[in-house]
Amino acid sequence: MPATALARLARRLPVVVVAGDAGLRGVDVVAADNWSGAHALVTHLVVDHRRRRLYHVDGPESAPDAKTRRLAMQAVIDGQPDAKLVGAHSGRFSVRSGEAAADRMLAEFGGVAGQLPDAIVCANDQMAIGVLRTLTARGIRVPDDIALVGFDDIYPATLCDPPLTTVRQPIRGIGERACEQLIERIATPTLRPTVELLPTELVIRSSCGCPPGTVARHLVPTVPMTRER
């Protein structure tokens, strides 16, 4: 929904936007701290695993979550002189679009393990699962030939072979907090709009190259952040 339409709606009704753009004006927003989570995830790849040639499977351009995760990834790359983004593909947060992204990447790099990027950073777990399916079918080993990470920590991410390294966002907590904010706004319509970012957590599994049981070195802030506008 365009920001202008949300602003018009908020003048008539109490509105809370779930997983919306933190830059929205005139409405309450409750979202995950995508920046910190994505920054910790890519830092783990680049610093701990020395992955230098990254390929990005992005989400839709209109998705605020995807945009924030993309910017965080680029910030890590910009801070590491020998790291670079060697390619990208925009997906739709679905398994099928992840499969399509992997097909495109393999076509770009010839499908030869030694010529592939070092790691694939996916904007969500569903696309990462699709990427993993395609790589496995083509004989590309994860993480031996290429590392793979996602975002969200959906349950199927634990069932993959190898299990996905990802970022856990508090999906239930976001919904609960959004409901609480809506109730507060109904009771007190004059409250100033706020943006509330709930903490995320880096979840280390095997798809990045870590052995089972590895503890994350790059911690994500655990204090919720709220600001008025």
Image: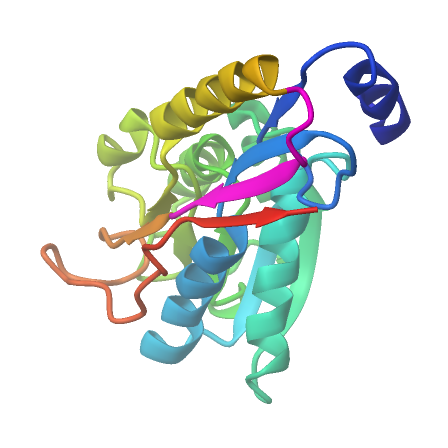
Could you tell me which residue is drawn at 23 percent across and 51 percent down? 205
| Residue 22 visible in rendering | yes
Report the side of 200 relative to 212 (left or right).
right
Q: Which quarter of the figure is the N terminus placed in?
A: top right
Report the side of 181 relative to 173 (left or right).
right
> Residue 203: horizontal and vertical position, in percent?
27, 50
Out of 63 and 77, give the one closest to the viewer.
63
| Residue 107 visible in rendering | no
Magenta-tinted stretch: 189-199
> Residue 171: horizontal and vertical position, in percent?
39, 28
Out of 228 and 90, give the one closest to the viewer.
228
Does the magenta portion include 192? yes
Query: Can you tell which quarter of the image residue 27 is in?
Result: top right
Could you tell me which residue is drawn at 60 percent across and 41 percent down? 195
Residue found at the very far left of the displayed protein:
213
Does the magenta portion include 156? no
Q: Is residue 65 above or below residue 8?
A: below
> Residue 160: horizontal and vertical position, in percent?
27, 34
